[in-house]
Every structure is written in C-alpha cells, then in structure tokens.
Image (spheres, rainbow, N blue to C red):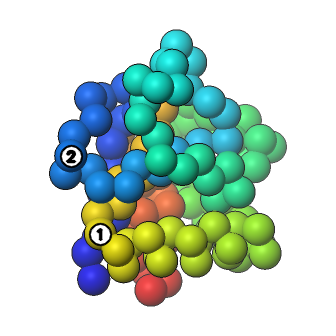
Amino acid sequence: MTSFRLKRVYAAPEASDGTRILVDRLWPRGIAKDKARIDLWLKDIAPSDALRERFHGKPEDWEAFCEAYAQELEEEAAQAAVKELRDLLKQGPVTLLYAARDENHNNAVALKAWLEENQ
C-alpha cells in the first residue's frame, strides 16, 4: 500500500499529489479555494479546537500533543474520516494538506504517523 504524502497547502499543486485532502479544522488564511485545488476537506480528522489551541506554538510539547490527538482519532467521527482516507489511498496517491509553518510539528505529521502505526 502506498504511503500518505504531506504538503503545505500553500505549495503549488502537482499532478503527483493525487487526491489532495485538507486535514486542518480551519480554512488556511489567504488562499482561495480554487487556487488550493483541494479535493476534500476532512474537518472531522483534524484536532479539536481545544487541542489545537492548547499546543499551538509549543513544539516542546509535541509528544503530549501526539498522544492527545491519537485519543481524538479513536472517536467515531474521526474513525469515519480515517476509513475515507484509507479507501482513497487504495485508489491512488493521497496528499495530506496542512497550513502550519512548522513542517515537523503539525497535525498532518502526527496524523500520518498515527495512520502508519494503526494500519
């Protein structure tokens, strides 16, 4: 099975991206919907507002964020979104899009790691 790809939503879309899925709860600032070329916006798989606000800008709390996010990913709405992601991956490449500036500490990185651990 192909692995999920990660990309900042502000980066130019490429044909190799396959299905482009926004995994943030909020729409990215300053980007028009037509320019973003987002195929699907999965808000239900994004961290809750409370979790996002609790860890925003605190890379030193990365492990705690990942653990709390993993718990949220076990909830019913998130599990339905996970199933949808896995079904799309069977059809071809899937790129998880995020808006965060930090390319190493963001919800898409945590989500990809969780998806790979929980196949």
Numbered disc 2: secondary structure? helix
Q: Which residue is mark 1?
A: 92
Picture coordinates of residue 31, whole percent (x, y): 49, 19
Q: Can the viewer see residue 64?
A: no
**Taking the image as drawn, is residue 18 in sight?**
yes
Q: Is residue 27 left or right of residue 1?
A: right
User: Badge 2: few (under 14), some or many (20 or more) residues near its Cα, within 10 Å?
Assistant: few
Furthest residue in direction front, as rendered: 34
Rendered position, 34 above or below 16: above
Label annotation for residue 72: none
Which residue: 27% across, 83% down?
Answer: 1
The residue lying at 42 percent from left, 63 percent from top is 112
Q: Report which residue position mark 2 lands on.
A: 15
* Residue 14 x/y as whole percent: 22, 40
Residue 43 placement, left or right of 18: right
Q: Residue at x 35, y 74 (%)?
A: 91
Instruction: Identify the mark nearer the N-term, 1 or 2.
Output: 2
- Give the image location of residue 113, x and y in percent: 41, 67
